[in-house]
Image: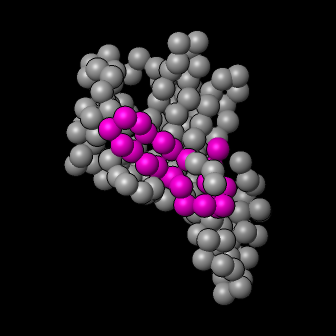
Amino acid sequence: IMSKSKINRLTRYIKTKVLSMSTDDYRKATLFATSSFDQDFQIPDLIGQTEILSEEHREKLCAHLPARAEGYSWSLVFSTSLHGFSLNSLYRKMHKLESPILIVIEDTDHNVFGALTSCSLHVSDHFYGTGESLLYKFNPHFKVFHWSGENLYFIKGNPESLAIGAGD
């Protein structure tokens, strides 16, 4: 997490150097400058039961929410224990959602990881989403993987698979 002085320097840099930056550089810089770095956040209320996400997980994730996602309750939209394992069911449940989506996965070795996507998941022939999207893991230590700025491959869904993040 960046210190307040680094954030202020970055913000001044963005304001004074924006004309010399490429569009991709500007998008990446403003994404991290406008995200919340304030540690005085409130843990969102949960609407629905989670079998995976602990309060400690929620605390750690809150520090990395985009500003437009702060202050809202988290609602359970899809759970494999309630809705099964069909990707089509997941896409149907997300059909009318527009808010950022938090995906939480626990594998058979009890590793918890996932993604925060800038928009709902849907089937598409091309990649979609924005640099607000990120990946994260909790095991062995919490780590967030922000957009590298190298490409625009955020999310791509089809009936057989879902991809979040990709390299060239």
Q: Residue placed at 67% from the left, 36% from the top?
A: 143
Vertical side of 114 occupied by 31: above or below: below
- Farthest residue toward the top? 109
Q: Is residue 51 visible?
A: yes
User: Picture quarter containing residue 30?
Assistant: bottom right
- In the drawing, does residue 81 fall left or right of residue 144? left
Percent across and percent down for residue 77 are 29, 33
Residue closer to the observer: 138 or 70: 138
The magenta segment: 145-165
Report if residue 128 lies within the magenta region.
Answer: no
Q: Residue placed at 25% from the left, 32% from the top?
A: 89
Vertical side of 120 occupied by 56: above or below: above
Q: Residue placed at 39% from the left, 45% from the top?
A: 157
Report if residue 161 lies within the magenta region.
Answer: yes
Quadrant showing the C terminus: bottom right
Q: Residue placed at 31% from the left, 53% from the top?
A: 98
Instruction: Tell me how many marks there are.
Output: 0
Percent across and percent down for residue 81 are 32, 16
Percent across and percent down for residue 22 are 66, 78
Vertical side of 138 occupied by 72: above or below: below
- In the drawing, does residue 87 fall left or right of residue 59? left
- In the drawing, does residue 31 fall left or right of residue 161? right
The way the protein has been coloured in the rendering is one colour
Percent across and percent down for residue 58 are 51, 31
Q: Is residue 67 visible?
A: no
User: Picture quarter containing residue 3?
Assistant: bottom right
